[in-house]
Image (cartoon, grey):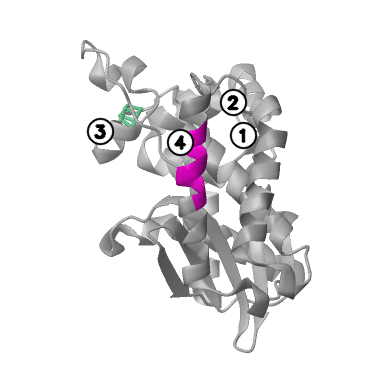
Amino acid sequence: MWFLSAAPRIIRGMSDRIAGQLAGLGHLSPSRASDFKVCPQLFKFRAIDRIEVPPTVYQARGTTAHLALQRLFDLPAPHRTPETLYDLFRQAWVELKTTEFSDLFANTEAERAWGIESLEVLANYFGIEDPRAVDPIDRELDMTEEVGHMTIRGILDRMDDEERGLVITDYKTGKAPPERYALPAFFALKIYALLTRIRTGRTPVALRLMYLNGPTVYEIPINDAQLDAMERQLEALWSAIERALDEDRWPTRTGVLCDYCSYRQRCPAWEGEAALAVPALAS
Ligand code: SF4
């Protein structure tokens, strides 16, 4: 989970409205920053208008699986078995269903089918690695660091200190994109790597996306030059958001993501289109 908080930079001629909106943005997730790159209108729906959409079964699976995997590593290595992970998932769901995901399922059968499918996805994790042989140095780590004039906050899934150096891992319960489209998915992890470098003075050596539904693992090397570029990219992104606010201009960018966009039915680019059932992206 990610947040990006940018202290409002009051620029010459900036109206009270813009200054107020910048201040009101508060914390944004890196996925929101990614939204802006993909489609400024999508960013507006989520970060400016803050239009809430009902939680989905995919989000419920992602949140519950993350909690279960986090707790798995609280246990001594010999206890990190598939049965334990399934139990942790069930326990986490009992906690989350009443707080974050109430009324998600129409009936018990639907919830049960979701649970069975979730455990099947979770079982794939053991095909990727043996958690008894892994000893992460951090999990669900809350990181807040200054980057330029921004304060960026992120909660890091997992960090391993391997022989080759620091490796940052992000769990995904959705399906992996085809490899040729996978690079943009590393956007948030590059920010994590940047925060890690700022905090620890160590540059991670690799970023890893672990898609349990498949399973598929993508990993890329990372270095200082890439993190310098990410720092510049974040500054440029924030300047572009400021301009969009100043001009109140939020272009739509239609593409394949529109098929998964929760706001399609209210999007100006699709005005007049018959109502569609839009599947949500899993985390
Ligand atoms: S439907 Fe497409 S164009 Fe409209 S906000 Fe969503 S991603 Fe952007």
Q: Is residue 76 left or right of residue 239?
A: right
Residue at the spot of label 4? 113
State which image quarter holds ligand 1.
top left
Q: Which mark is residue 254?
A: 3
Q: Which residues are the magenta region?
A: 112-119
* Residue 95 relative to residue 253: left or right: right
Mark 1 or mark 4, which has the lower sequence index?
Answer: 1
Of pointers 1 and 3, the one earlier in the residue sequence: 1
- What amino acid is found at the position of numbered circle 4 in the picture? Ala
In magenta segment, residue 113: yes
Q: Residue at x 43, y 67 (%)?
A: 217
Residue 15: horizontal and vertical position, in percent? Answer: 60, 20
Q: Dividing the picture into quarters, in which one does residue 69 lie?
A: bottom right
Q: Residue 159 carries which label?
A: none
What residue is disc 2 on?
14
Q: Regarding mark 1 in the picture, which secondary structure is present there?
A: loop
What secondary structure is marked by label 4? helix
Q: Specify the label residue 11 is tagged with.
A: 1
Residues under labels 1 and 3: Cα distance?
31 Å
Labels 1 & 2 near each other (Cβ < 8 A): yes
Badge 3 marks a residue whose secondary structure is loop
